[in-house]
Amino acid sequence: MNLSERKWCGWGLKQSPDLLKDKRNSFWNWLRELSGFTELPHTLPVDINSISLNEPTLPSTLISELETKISQGKITSEPIERIIHARGKSYLDTLALRSGNLPDVPDIVIYPQTKEEVIEVIRWALFNNVAIIPFGGGTSVVGGVNPIKGQNHIGIATLDLREMNRLINIDTKSRIACAESGIEGPHLEELLQKEGFTLGHYPQSFEFSTLGGWVSARGAGHQSIRYGKAEDWFVGAEIISPPGPWKTEAFPASAAGPQIKDLIPGSEGTLGIMTDIEFRIHPLPQEKYYNAYIFPSFEAGIEASRQLMQTDIPLAMIRLSDAQETFFYTAMQMGGGDPSSLPKFCLMLIGLEGDSPCITAGRQIIESIFANHQAISLGEGIADQWFQQRFLLPYLRDEMLDYGLGVDTLETATRWNQLLDLHEAIHKAIQETIENDPDQKPQFPIVMAHISHAYLDGASLYFTFVFPRSLKDPSQQWHRIKNSASHVIRYHKATISHHHGIGTDHKQWLTGEKSALAYELLRQIKYQIDPKNILNPGKLF
Ligand SMILES: Cc1cc2nc3c(=O)[nH]c(=O)nc-3n(C[C@H](O)[C@H](O)[C@H](O)COP(=O)(O)OP(=O)(O)OC[C@H]3O[C@@H](n4cnc5c(N)ncnc54)[C@H](O)[C@@H]3O)c2cc1C
């Protein structure tokens, strides 16, 4: 991990890949027209060196005391470290970083090397009332790593876990591995694949997110149909909490009452710091088959997806774009297109992974189900291209922000019988809010979605929306869009998040989703484990 190669206020590496190539000029010109600008504004981030930070509130004597317990040089209050740990990667986070207006940054950043050091940090924080922000890759898109402290806290320490990144062991018989929580995606997969195994968890943020972050946020990788969501492959963990270190159960199955380990995925650092995590692994698949199809409508694609999910074939991924997303990605390749004559057809990418005979049988079943829905195969080339570029799209967001645009995503999940209605209602809510924006009116708002993850009983919907950014109050503009979509999600009794988590951004919707009683139970558990609320205050609860 070399942080100096990474952008301080955007996605990924400073050396960004060029997605648009020779279509660059026509693509931006096209987006300019849709956004209603005569000229795209230049809205670059401030220079990081021009940002002035508040002085740390933690007394230096306390920092010195902690320094005696932590490996040398692993506590820092360098301004650059405080800035890059001040926010995650949400739209609001990125706006805040780019503006340089950062009233709240951590006082110090700690890079623990061992679980004993994490124990020392928690003891010190508990004794001195210091808020601790667990930090994995910092790719949270819900405000999950933002430095918030409670009234009683005298300061904030961010605990960056990325130097705790060892693969501890692989039990090939039980197909369970154990690794330190700060290990990043590529490093983890490299070590597992050397031994012929994979975890198979590939979120779009794979390159820069960590095992601990995936579990904490109940994340989902692209191939979650085969490899599971984080809560499915999570076996157990060692956790450091204010009462001390503890381990969750880690049985293949158990009827010994409710399982405490079920509290950990989705706990977002509020119940403890996971140091070692056990997770299920799979032998590398003998074969992978990815293909692209065109469906005559979103409805036909949804019905075919449902039927496929209810077969036994080794599906790894179903990704069904709606007509708007299909159009947008085609326009990206072509450098433009006319949105007023939007075709209805929808792109589906489908993936199978597993043993060759199962793949062969699976392909036949796909062909027969898809034929009933008038789907046309586009061949493996388009799917290959998606596979090559699947981690690159987020780089485009930074360019959009440089050109006066706003772009964000949101996601939810519901049952098959609700999916089409929910899709339509969220789409309408976002589109109308963007169209009625008091500050910036687009020519054509870009609102698009895809089914990103599928289950026996339903699927997730993942929306992306691009809009001319209000330069007066971009944060209020975002809240208007987010609130309109979230109201619709709750009205349709869908979940407020399928895989991004709660953080700060979804907190207000949580009680409604869980019920007052269930929420209070969770709050009491939090209080029991962390009565001084030193663990990631302001998130989830
Ligand atoms: C471009 C982009 C694409 C994304 N794509 C996906 C996707 O496809 N699927 C998906 O699921 N998510 C996605 N995300 C969201 C994000 O990457 C996930 O939530 C991811 O799981 C966060 O991992 P992280 O290591 O970055 O954790 P962080 O962002 O550092 O932390 C996330 C939460 O976990 C807590 N935490 C971290 N480590 C620990 C630990 N060891 N112990 C206790 N608490 C801890 C933090 O306090 C925080 O509350 C995407 C984000 C971006 C910016």
Image (cartoon, rainbow, N blue to C red):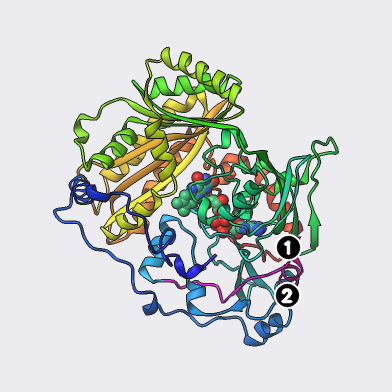
Q: In the depicted view, which residue is nearer to us: 261 or 507? A: 261
Please name which of the two marks, 1 or 2, marks the residue nearer to the observer.
2
Residue sticking out furthest to the right: 256
Magenta residues (range): 102-121
Q: Which residue is mark 1?
A: 531
* Res 50 quadrant in image: bottom left
243 shown above or below 496: below
Q: Are marks 1 and 2 in contact (CB under 8 Å)?
A: no
Q: Quadrant of the C terminus?
A: bottom right
Tell me, yes or no, whether the highlighted magenta stretch contains residue 420.
Answer: no
Tell me, yes or no, whether the highlighted magenta stretch contains residue 111.
Answer: yes
321 shown above or below 209: above
Q: Position of residue 47 (x, y in %)?
A: 35, 74
Residue type highlighted by circle 1: Pro
Q: Secondary structure at mark 1?
A: loop
Give the CA separation, mark 1 to mark 2. Answer: 15 Å
125 horizontally vs 502: left or right? right
112 horizontally vs 5: left or right? right
Residue 124 - label: 2
* Res 71 quadrant in image: bottom right
Q: Position of residue 396 (x, y in %)?
A: 34, 52
Q: Position of residue 45 (x, y in %)?
A: 33, 67
534 shown above or below 190: below
Say few, some or many: other residues with alpha carbon within 10 Å of mark 1 (under 14 / 14 to 19 / 20 or more).
Answer: some
Which residue lies at the image location 28% right of the left edge and 36% below the top edge?
A: 330
Q: Position of residue 114 (x, y in %)?
A: 72, 67
Q: In the depicted view, which residue is nearer to us: 502 or 168? A: 168
332 horizontally vs 218: left or right? left
